[in-house]
Amino acid sequence: MEPPQAISLMLSNVETIPGHSVVSSLGLVTGSTVRAKHIGKDIFAGLKNIVGGELKAYTELLNESRNEALQRMMADANSRGANAIVNVRFATSNVAAGASELFCYGTAVVVQ
Amino acid sequence: MDSELVLILTYIAVPLLFTFAFPVFSWAIGRWYQGTLLNALNEQEKQQNAAFGGHLVGSTSSKMTTLSAQSSVLLHTSIVVGPSMGQMFFMWIKSIFGGQLHSYDVVIQYGRREVIRRLQEQATHLGCSSIVNLRIETSTISFAKNQESKTSSMEFLAYATGIRN
């Protein structure tokens, strides 16, 4: 599946978009993605666990996935005709062994 | 006498060596490696603070800062850190007695400070002059199907709103 075209909305995790004023609220929008580890990366992470410290492969994987969750949330907001999302929150949970769900949610609004 | 010594060696000394040699090795290397990481982080924090005078970072959505803003951007960054196997092994022993787990402290503190530093770096890169409403979330990542997995790690996620004046 082709990745959808990147949508760019104004996002913030405070109650408003600083520098703009909220005109109307369009309700809750969510975006989520479930990612499983890569077996090769897991072996490497196991090796890295000998010394500890940052596991770069996982950092990248999670950042990438979180961006995708954000993209889905923005697509949801875009389809409602919003131009910004306020009060964005992130949540992470382990849905199954070796897989995490990256979830983000916010309130879609129209700002001026 | 001689066969007794061989028996002791095979059934006590060798298993003991195999049990402790790797954790001790891993602990020693891990301690050194994490020390270098922390030193590097201290340097980077100092440099960042010297170069930009330190971003105003706050965990409140202060009206004072947001009112004068021109525009804003959502910043988010995360880091996955794990303790070394040696640390986990000694922690397992320590957990019999309880008390402060110093080696985990080091890993966790490193993760938190590094993720905040990266957030500041990102803010600078995007031209923000201050950071408001900083939130840090912690979650554990299990790699294997069972909880007794030898590998375990933590993810620190920091997100905030960057303010451009």
Image (cartoon, coloured by chain):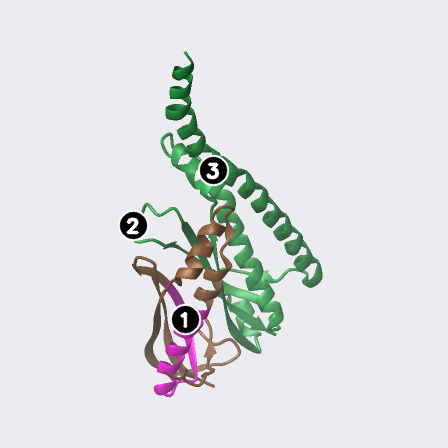
Chain colours: A brown, B green
Q: Which residues are magenta?
A: A64-91
Q: Which residue is mark 1?
A: A87
Residue at the spot 38% in from the left edge and 29% down from the top edge: B97
Near mark 1 (Cα within 10 A), the count class, few <14, some 14-19 or many ≥20, is some
The furthest residue to the right: B51
Q: Residue at x 59, y 48 (%)?
A: B38
**Could you say where residue B133 lies in the image, as x and y percent from the top left?**
48, 64
Residue receiving disc 3:
B22
Question: Does the magenta segment cover residue A85?
Answer: yes
Give the chain of mark 3.
B
- Tell me residue A99's x, y (percent): 34, 61
In the image, taking residue A53 as reference, residue A39 lies left or right, namely left
Residue at the spot 59% in from the left edge and 50% down from the top edge? B37
Q: Quadrant of the N terminus of chain B?
A: top left
What is the three-letter code of the residue carrying label 1? Asn
Q: Residues within 10 Å of mark 3 (few under 14, many from 20)?
A: some
Query: Disc 2 marks which residue?
Result: B146
| First in sequence: mark 3 vs mark 2 | 3
Residue type, numbered disc 2: Asn
Q: CA distance from mark 3 to mark 1?
A: 48 Å
